[in-house]
Image: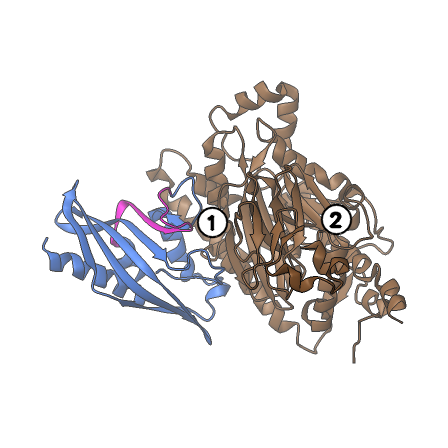
Amino acid sequence: MDRYRGNSQAIADLVKGHAVHRDVYVDREIFELEMEQLFPNCWVYIGHESQLKNTGDFITSKIGNQPVLASRHRDGQVYVLHNRCPHKGVKIASEPCGNTGKFFRCPYHAWSFKTDGSLLAIPLKKGYEGTGFDTDQAARGLTRIENVKIYRGLIFVRLAQEGLSFEEFFGDALSTIDNMADRSPEGELEVISQPIRYMHTCNWKMLVENQTDTCHPMVAHESSAGTAVNVWEREKDNFSETPMAVQLYAPFMSPYEFYEGAGIRVWPNGHGHTGVSGSIHQDYEDVDGYQAMMTEAYGKERAAEILGDIRHNTIYFPNIMVKGPVGILRNFIPLGVDKTLVESWVFRLKGAPDKLYERALMYNRFINAPTSIVGHDDLEMYERAQEGLHSNGNEWVNLRRLWEDDEPEETTEVVNGTSERQMRNQFYAWRKFMVQNMDQAVEAAE
Amino acid sequence: MNRDDLIDFVYDEAATIDQMRWDDWLALFHKDGRYWMPLEWQQEDPILQPSLMYEDRLLLTVRVERLAGERTFSQKPKSRCHHLMERPRILSMGEDGGVHKLRTSFIYTETRGDLLERYSGWVSHELVEVDGTLQIKLKRINLINFDAPFSNIQLFI
């Protein structure tokens, strides 16, 4: 029997603020409801406009369990479509990206579609005459997703017809995307390389939470960043300058006091970021010529403001993290209750020196790759949690750090940087978007 | 150096990894040696194209020391590995500035606890002679499925 489907109270009861029930990580029905409710109700990232430069360019992605396809039509617009032939359901595009030319053609029966999704042609069309096909949903071609927003090149989609507008959903949180794009002297980002992909046998939310967990680096990463610092202390006399690698690794070993002071900012709808007044990205060496380029582009004051914003990790609820000062976006794609595909993308700042792109690529392989020793530390913890949560010794996950009884749920505020406030913030949003439209859906079904 | 010396070097290098003789393995690298695992097909640039790994001796030393760390939780239990290799093909014998180039087809297996993962591809060696001894200038690993979403790869291919 379903415990949670159609029972918004049972779902709401899983989130107590200072604790969440383990079912949010291990229960299959909850996972199915996340796919059916949570993801469609939210604005979800599917890719970057620079991946769709030319007419006919396409990318594929998933929102929850829904396969989607975005393509550049000859009118210059990007259309986001359900990646499913209206005939027998075959996926139209099977590759992560490519160029389809003037039209998409289903490989099964050669139904073909324009790059805006509309039906172009069907073989033996006269067989449909007099069948009422013209009024069939299939006659309209690939189902188009109406709620699409491209913001500074990032493509977001909301599957549900009804819901918060893009601006209402993200609000001030968009400032991180703005800062990342403004770091380009031309104000634009582009994707020119494949993401690093990393398979995690754990629930997707563990990864998202870990992005604002500042109490684990000095513990879990003692093995990787700690060893890197020790080896450097021993070897540094053999070097004339500090390698970029050491600059990237060492700040992970910052003490609790550093993270406490750095602060966390929360926004409504589950968004938030670490590194308000300080971050592990603040002390990277200047890149030759970059400062001058930025001053030229924006003026001295504005350039200093952009480069002085060194936010650590920004969560865009539900499932992406943006690292503005480095130019990295991580997409935590849920595949199953205990299976998550992580795609880590690097943006190139248009017009900026190559050195910045080199550093972002290096950061990505050091921290976000299946070959990353830092990643090994984290994944080990997630996998142990995914197993440990089945213990009947305690059904609750503790999120009480710096919790207050009357914690406001839909607010913007800056708190102590070691708080679990942002994780709780995500769960308030999780509860909200899980049950939004749920009761209406049940009523409609009855 | 004759052909057998070069071929033996490639097999012996894999053996130091399989036997987890990490210090001996690091010692095989030239002081400017690199270990490279590209992420793109026929990748040419390790700097401005994404890689899974591109590491010098300092970074490889970090990895090796980490494996033995008391608080290296992803190595409790420890990983083990095995290389199965075809006979290395010698592509050049020092014609190119004293660099010997070899290419070897492999199947690599890494195991930890009850899990076993298998990877295959080609490894390229660029070897130089220093004081009569061969050293690795570049070890490049081209996985056949370089773009797949792997779980942890903790040791060395």
Confirm whether the magenta stretch covers residue B39: yes
Give, as a single range, the part of the protein colored magenta: B27-45
Please give left or right for residue A375 compared with residue B3 in the image. right
- Specify whether residue A89 is painted magenta: no
Q: Amino acid at mark 1?
A: Arg
- Chain A visual colour: brown
Residue B35 placement (x, y as % from top left): 33, 51
Which colour style is shown?
A: by chain
Q: Residue at x 67, y 50 (%)?
A: A118
Q: Nearer the viewer, mark 1 or mark 2?
A: 2
Few, some or many residues within 10 Å of mark 2 (<14, 14–19, 20+): some
Q: Which residue in the protein does label 1 denote? A: A365
User: Does label 1 or label 2 sit earlier along the sequence?
Assistant: 2
Q: Position of residue A410 (x, y in %)?
A: 83, 49
Residue closest to the eye, B104 or A136:
A136
In which quadrant of the rendered view does residue A93 lie?
Answer: bottom right
**Would residue A379 be visible to someone looking at this image?**
yes
Specify the subunit that label 2 lies on: A
Q: CA distance from mark 1 to mark 2?
A: 36 Å
The residue sitting at the bottom extreme is A1
Quick one: A120 or B5, which is closer to the camera? A120
For residue A233, side relative to residue A349 (left or right):
left
The hue in which chain B appears in the rendered picture of the protein? blue
Quadrant including the N terminus of chain A: bottom right
Residue A417 visible, this angle: no
A108 or B32, which lies in front? A108
Q: Quadrant of residue B13?
A: bottom left
Residue A146: numbered disc: 2
**For the residues tagged 1 and 2, is the chain the same?**
yes
Dot 1 alpha-carbon crowd within 10 angstroms: few under 14, some 14 to 19, many 20 or more: many
- Residue at the spot x=33%, y=39% of the render? A238
